[in-house]
Image (cartoon, rainbow, N blue to C red):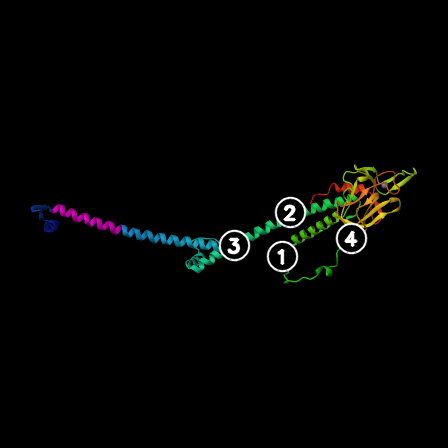
Amino acid sequence: MQIGVIANEVIACFKRWFHKRSFIIVSEHKVKHISISGGFQFSLVMALVACLVWASYSTGNFYAARSVLKERTQALRSVTSAKVQNNFNSVFHVGPASTRHITGDDPEIASLSAPLVTPSALANNKIFARIATLEHKVIELTNTNDAIVQRIRDKTAQRIDELESIIKQTGLSTNDLKKKHADKAPPADNRKGAQGGPYIPDTSLEMWPQANEMFESLDKLAMLRQIMRNLPLDKPIPNAEQQSQFGHRIDPFNGHLAFHAGLDLTGADGTNTKIQSPANGKVIAAGHNGAYGISIDIDHGYGIVTRYGHLSSLNVEEGQTVKKGDFIGTMGSTGRSTGPHLHYEVRYHDRPMNPLNFITAGRYVPEE
Ligand SMILES: [Zn+2]
């Protein structure tokens, strides 16, 4: 009974709102009559309501999605910030960084996320990251430097061994030569001279013992090279032929066993053969010298003197400094000589040494 009353009310209401409507449209002097049924009007109203509901639903979804995105961005920033801080702590050993567990909801990380949004905190994080990168580069550079220093030390040690071995072949003592070299060096006080400038303590070398050892080795190598330049390791005649060797032999004049204190050398140009100084030195004698005939003595330092006998002429005078390879005189047959040749001696503290040992050792001198 009541349902019937409600139904009648609804039908009455529907008929009141959606009764048939007529419209009269006047267009270009013509009159048109349009009639719209109640059912069509109801359909139009329902379609409008559906559009409004859909628009409201979409707007709600958009705002909800934007809110979720914002939260996720914030969480990502928090985790990134925490990682940067953790890296910094690892490099500078601040706290138990390596054991810290990093998650987005960690309260410690959450506290870090707050300063991240301020420009100064962002700048700090960038500086920490930069410092960590630079620290890493410093470690890399130090390792590279150590490797370079080690290579130089190895190469220097190898070269020192080579030079000492060459000196040993000559029959001289490397330690004696080094000692003489040190004695010859001017005292430390005299070396200072007129100098000045600000005092800069060389702490870098104190902190780097490998470098100190490297410089000591390089000094030692430089000293050995300087000694080598004064050793008569070259032939006084480049393409000499050896006629008589150092040591005991039968004397060519009287046929008796005698000691020959040098080498007898001849050259392809006979009496025109030029004699060259085999090393740097200073002429300490040049002229007639008994059985040696016209003779030259050159002091090479370190107690070493070379002598050139039976010359025909001199190209140097006493007191003159000569360099390795300088033309000093011409071959001849003056003094106690059977024919044109050079009598060549190497003396160490006036004790004759075998010149051939020097010439042989000279073949192993590396080029500088
Ligand atoms: Zn001789």
Residue 22 visible at all: no
Residue matched to label 3: 132
Give how far apart the Cα atoms at labels 2 and 1 are.
Answer: 19 Å
On the question of residue 289 being in view, the answer is yes
Q: Earlier in the sequence, mark 2 or mark 1?
A: 2
Q: Is residue 249 above or below residue 107?
A: above
Predominant SS of the magenta segment: helix
Q: Is residue 8 magenta?
A: no
Task: Give the structural element (helix, strand or loop) at label 2.
Answer: helix
Q: Residues within 10 Å of mark 1 (few under 14, many from 20)?
A: few
- Seen from the viewer's position, the closer of residues 368 and 38 is 368
Label ID, residue 151: 2
Residue 353, quarter of picture? top right
Which range is magenta? 38-57
Mark nearest the camera among 3 and 4 is: 4
Which disc number belongs to residue 180? 4
Locate the C terminus by quadrant.
Answer: top right
Between discs 1 and 4, the one toward the N terminus: 4
Q: Nearer the viewer, residue 328 or 157?
A: 328
Give the CA separation, mark 2 to mark 4. 30 Å
Sequence-earlier tag: 3 or 1: 3
Are the residues flagged by discs 1 and 4 in contact, CB closer than 8 Å?
A: no
Q: Earlier in the sequence, mark 3 or mark 4?
A: 3
